[in-house]
Amino acid sequence: MRTYAFLGIGIILGLIVCAQSPVYAQLMINKGKVTIDIQPQQTYMGSLTVQNSSDQDLAVRVYMEDFRYEAPYEGTKEFFPVGTQPDSCGEWFTFSPQEFSLPAFTSRDVSYAVKVPPSVKGGYYGVMFFETSPGRLQDVRMDLTIVQRIGCLFFLEGVDKEKRISIDNISLEEASVYGRLTNRGNITLVINGVFYILDQTGVVVDRGNIVPLYLPSGIQSEFETGFSSSIGAGTYTMVLTFDLEDGAVLVKEIDFRKDSSERITVLNIRD
C-alpha cells in the first residue's frame, strides 16, 4: 500500500476564505525526501507518485528549485531558482512528464533521471515541486487564485561525505541546558538530539528531546532544552546524544551539582 505525504513540504500560496466552506485542491506525493549516494559521471533513476485526492481535475506543472535551510535551522527553508546556490543539483535532473492533467481521485508517476557531473564533492540539494492552479474563486469581497505546490527534497551526497559536528558554549542555568552546534562536515546534516540525567547511583531521573536542527555545511546554531526542575539537590551526569543519521552520533557528558538553593554548577564536560 502506498503512503502519501500530505502537502509534503507543501506551500499553499493562495488561501481562500469566504462565507462558504474553504476550497482547497488536494495534491499529494508519496515521498517528502529522497537521499541518493552519488558517484561522478553516474546516472540515477527513480520516480515519484503524485495523487489528486480532490473531486476536481487538476493541471499539474513539475519543476526544480534550489533550497537552503535558514536560521534558526529548525526546518524552515528558503527557495531559489535552479543554479543560484553553490550546492545546487537541479540542473542535473531530467523528468517526465513536466506538465499533465490529473483527473479527480487518480494518481500517476513522474519519472526522473539524475546525471552526475565528473567532479562532485560533499552534498548537493534541490526540490522537485508539483504545482497546480485549479481555478479562481470570485466573491463580492475578493477575487483570488488558488495556487498549491508540494515538493520532494533531494539530498545527493558524494562518496566523500563527512558527517562531523562540534559542540561548545555548553552551560546549565536553572532547569535548562544551552550550547552551540557547528557542522564541520561537507553535507547538510539533520541532527536529532536527546538527553538523560543520571544520579550518583546510575538511576535515570529525567530524559527528553532536543528540537531537531537542519544545519548546512559550515553553519552553526544555538540549541537549548529544559529538564525537570523537580530534581533535588545532589550531583548528576547529563548525557547529550546527537544523532546525525546513518549511525553517526556525537555524545557529551556533563557532570553538574545542584545545591539546596537551586543553583546549578557545571563540574566537568567530556566526550
Image (tube, rainbow, N blue to C red):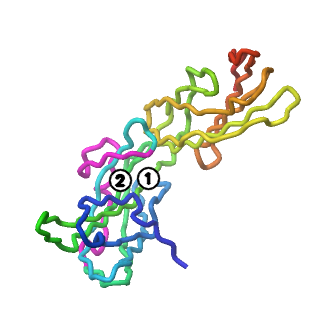
Disc 2 marks a residue whose amino acid type is: Gly
Height in image: 201 above or below 6? above
Query: Which contiguous range is marked in magenta?
Result: 75-100
Disc 1 marks a residue whose amino acid type is: Leu
Dot 2 or dot 1, earlier in sequence: 2
SS type, badge 1: strand
Q: Distance between the residues labelled 2 and 1?
A: 9 Å
Q: Mark 2 points at which residue?
A: 126
Q: Where is residue 142 in the image (x, y as percent from the top left)?
A: 13, 63
Marks 2 and 1: CB-CB under 8 Å?
yes
Q: Residue 156 carries which label?
A: 1
Height in image: 235 above or below 72? above
Residue 221 lies left or right of residue 97; in this view the side is right
**Picture quarter with the C terminus:** top right
| Magenta-colored stretch includes residue 82 | yes
Residue in the image at 41% along x and 56% along y: 154
Q: How many labels sit on residues?
A: 2
Q: Which mark is residue 268?
A: none
Q: Where is residue 108 in the image (x, y as percent from the top left)?
A: 37, 80
Instruction: Indicate which label's residue lies in the foreground, 2 or 1.
Output: 2
| Magenta-colored stretch includes residue 97 | yes
Q: Which of 175 and 151 is in front in this view?
A: 175
Residue in the image at 51% along x and 76% along y: 2
Residue in the image at 71% along x and 32% along y: 239
Q: Which residue lies furthest to the front in this view?
A: 19
Height in image: 24 above or below 69? below
Residue 129 lies left or right of residue 122; in this view the side is left
Q: Position of residue 185 (x, y in %)?
A: 50, 35
